[in-house]
Amino acid sequence: TRRKKGIQAALPIVYGNETSKLPDDAPELQLGHTHQWTVYVRGPNGADIAHYVRKVVFRLHESFTNAVRTIEAPPFEVTETGWGEFEIVIAVHLHDFPERPIKLTHMLRLFPPEDQAVIDDPSRPDLLVMERYDEIVLNEPTEAFYDQFLQN
Ligand code: SLL
């Protein structure tokens, strides 16, 4: 495969979690669960990342059934209910480098941490959002990828 020598591409992504408290009548409360959350990898402002993301693998805490969740199409996210916070390992597999996934880690938050900014959506005051903007740096993309997505 021919690659663009000396070219570095920065692919923007946003990853993190959204959490809300379970309503009083939620059946999951019987299991001791207190919150519903979604962990995700997205493009900034809803941009489509499926051009360069082939699949995303989320490794949840082992207390979850099928703790390894592989998402092969957008939206690249997992929604669950639970009771605790834990670190999620996220592997982003690119079309261009399928053999070399990008590893991200995200601390799932159910409660607002004291030392971190929390993004508030005024239309959803019950929703806690903990997310981070990042760039996946692609070294020497394939010529096909470069021609299709990067050159403009
Ligand atoms: C803690 N170290 O003790 C962490 C572990 C694990 C959270 C949190 C499981 C939900 C289910 C769940 O929420 N685990 O039963 O499926 O806080």
Image (cartoon, grey):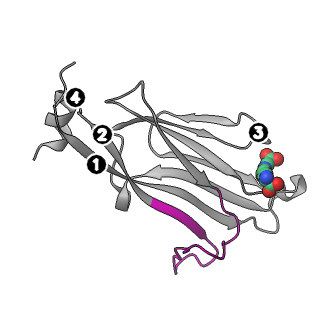
Q: Which of marks 1 and 2 is nearer the N terminus?
A: 1
Q: Which amino acid does label 2 sit on?
A: Leu
- The residue that label 4 is drawn on is 142
How far apart are labels 3 and 1 at the CA level?
33 Å
Coordinates of residue 131 in the picture (x, y in percent): 51, 62
Residue numbers of the magenta segment? 108-132
Disc 4 to disc 3: CB gap under 8 Å: no
Quadrant including the N terminus: top left
Q: How crowded is mark 3: few (under 14 residues within 10 Å), some or many (20 or more)?
A: few
Residue 36 in the image: state x and y as whole percent. Answer: 70, 58
Q: Determine whether, in the image, residue 9 is placed left or right of residue 97.
A: left
Q: Where is residue 40 in the image (x, y as percent from the top left)?
A: 52, 51
Q: Can residue 114 be seen in this view?
A: yes
Residue at the disc numbered 3: 62
Pick whichever, 55 or 139, lies toward us: 139
Amino acid type at circle 3 is Glu
